[in-house]
Image: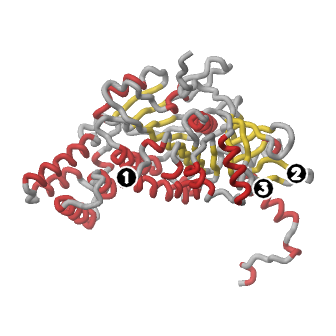
């Protein structure tokens, strides 16, 4: 038994064990300074992408890289126009675009982006997901780097209108988001059938749940047609039957009954956007569909994954669907090394997602002035009461495109002895780099 216990004596603190710890720290650091990248460390850092520059560890500016080889989780917040979406796009570029302009990317990731906004009429005033613009190069830069393909999955009831907006860009395809009936399971059915924001379960839904439970007990694969036959045998009154039919109609609008839609492939170096913006889809329903899409993605054969919640404040509201999606995201982050997944959450409203902040390995703060937002974030950052006042002032005075980053496991330089300087208890001011793809999020000015 004694052999299984670690030896805390000074004799065990050998150079070999110290080097081993140093190697592990560098290999798994989510952010790395340029000083750590050399011929000696290339086997530990096989891929990384430029995120910006800082001078936290020395007087001169130094490049800061995102370690895309390891799973990580990022939480970004800031007011509109502070550079939040720009930073999100830079993280995506680093993860899916193999170009020497950014660093090294031997194995590009696949990415799934969630997007939702109010959509009315013909989409006047509606903006497509900014991640779409990664399919178009910035013509001012050499090389013309861009994502080879962006696939957009949309609500079937809004396919005609929203596809006109997305297809204005090259290298973009649009497909209705539909589930194969054969891929349904009991959990997905319970999720799809529970679209009401009310916490009270109607009597007819209790009967539906009982049918699903009995089918699950049988142990066979879920059969949607058999489920419909079971429903027909139930005696519902006219009011219950009407409500049930409304749920079934909504459910079947997202089912590929005639096998006409291809399933998403989630290929490396490509981006899949789930944009559920639709007059007939509210934020609650969008979150339920995002959760189903997330589960599909995690179960896919893609080995290196990235999940991005774009403008999360537009749909992660105080609704049951958002709560369910939040719980799934929390579980995903806790198991990110098992899934090989990176999670990026971008929002203007950090108070709605405080549970996620606590688990993220990188917190990126762009400019804001709300004391309420600051209260939501400061609980997850180790600062003294005196430092908090100065930190709030630093956040308020940030220029667009500049952020304060907290990442305790980041390696931001070396000291005079060559030892790593980590981000523990440090608030690192970073100037975010320029994008190499087209920027679709620039503010519209009068002149």
State the mark number for residue 191: none
Residue in the image at 55% along x and 25% along y: 443
Find out whether the residues at labels 1 and 3 contact each other: C-beta distance under 8 Å: no
* Element marked by disc 2: loop
List the residue tagged with mark 1. Answer: 319
Q: Who is closer to the viewer here, 13 or 289? A: 289
Find out whether the residues at labels 2 and 3 contact each other: C-beta distance under 8 Å: no
| Residue 85 falls in image quadrant | top right
Any part of residue 222 in sight = yes
Looking at the image, the residue that sits furthest to the right is 416
Q: Position of residue 248 (x, y in %)?
A: 20, 47
List the residue tagged with mark 2. Answer: 415
Viewer-side label of 2, 3: 2
Measured in 3D between alpha carbons, the distance from the residue under mark 2 to the one under mark 3, in whole angstroms, is 16 Å
List the residue tagged with mark 3. Answer: 23
* Element marked by disc 1: loop
* Element marked by disc 3: helix
User: In the picture, which quadrant includes the C terminus?
Assistant: top right
Q: Is residue 161 left or right of residue 61?
A: left
Q: Is residue 237 left or right of residue 31?
A: left
Tell me: residue 258, above or below residue 246.
Answer: above
Label 3 Cα crowd, 10 Å radius (few <14 / some 14-19 / many 20+): few
Measured in 3D between alpha carbons, the distance from the residue under mark 2 to the one under mark 1, in whole angstroms, is 49 Å
Q: Who is closer to the viewer here, 420 or 378? A: 378
Which of marks 3 and 2 precedes in the sequence?
Answer: 3
Q: Is residue 244 left or right of residue 278?
A: left
Q: Who is closer to the viewer here, 117 or 275? A: 117
Measured in 3D between alpha carbons, the distance from the residue under mark 1 to the one under mark 3, in whole angstroms, is 44 Å
Residue in the image at 29% along x and 60% along y: 199
Which of marks 3 and 1 precedes in the sequence?
Answer: 3
Q: Position of residue 116 (x, y in %)?
A: 41, 38
């Amino acid at each position: 038994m004694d052999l299984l216990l670690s030896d805390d004596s000074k004799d065990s603190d050998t150079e070999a064990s110290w080097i081993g710890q140093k190697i592990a720290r560098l290999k798994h650091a989510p952010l790395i300074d340029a000083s750590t990248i050399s011929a000696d460390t290339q086997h530990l850092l096989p891929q990384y992408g430029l995120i910006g520059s800082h001078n936290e560890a020395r007087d001169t500016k130094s490049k800061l890289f995102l370690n895309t080889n390891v799973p990580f989780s990022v939480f970004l917040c800031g007011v509109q126009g502070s550079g939040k979406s720009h930073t999100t796009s830079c993280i995506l570029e680093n993860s899916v675009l193999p170009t020497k302009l950014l660093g090294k990317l031997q194995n590009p990731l696949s990415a799934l982006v969630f997007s939702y906004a109010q959509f009315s009429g013909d989409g006047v005033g509606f903006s497509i997901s900014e991640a779409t613009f990664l399919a178009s190069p910035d013509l001012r830069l050499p090389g013309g780097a861009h994502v080879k393909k962006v696939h957009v999955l949309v609500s079937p009831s809004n396919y005609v209108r929203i596809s006109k907006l997305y297809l204005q860009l090259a290298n973009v395809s649009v497909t209705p988001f539909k589930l194969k009936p054969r891929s349904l399971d009991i959990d997905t059915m319970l999720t799809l059938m529970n679209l009401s924001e009310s916490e009270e379960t109607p009597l007819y839904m209790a009967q539906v749940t009982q049918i699903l439970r009995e089918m699950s007990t049988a142990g066979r694969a879920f059969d949607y047609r058999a489920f419909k036959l079971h429903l027909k045998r139930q005696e519902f009154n006219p009011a219950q039957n009407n409500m049930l039919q409304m749920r079934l109609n909504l459910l079947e609008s997202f089912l590929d009954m005639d096998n006409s839609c291809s399933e998403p492939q989630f290929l490396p170096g490509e981006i899949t956007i789930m944009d559920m913006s639709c007059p007939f889809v509210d934020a609650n329903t969008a979150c339920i569909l995002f959760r189903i899409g997330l589960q599909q993605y995690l179960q896919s054969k893609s080995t290196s994954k990235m999940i991005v919640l774009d403008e999360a404040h537009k749909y992660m509201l105080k609704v049951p669907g958002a709560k369910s999606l939040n719980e799934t995201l929390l579980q995903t982050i806790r198991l990110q090394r098992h899934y090989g997944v990176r999670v990026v959450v971008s929002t203007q409203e950090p108070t709605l997602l405080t549970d996620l902040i606590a688990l993220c390995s990188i917190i990126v703060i762009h400019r804001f002035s709300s004391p309420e937002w600051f209260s939501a974030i400061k609980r997850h950052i180790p600062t003294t009461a005196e430092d908090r006042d100065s930190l709030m002032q630093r956040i308020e005075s940030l220029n667009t495109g500049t952020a304060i980053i907290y990442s305790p496991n980041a390696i931001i330089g070396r000291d005079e002895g060559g030892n790593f300087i980590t981000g523990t208890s440090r608030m690192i001011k970073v100037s975010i780099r320029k994008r190499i793809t087209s920027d679709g999020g620039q503010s519209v000015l009068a002149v």
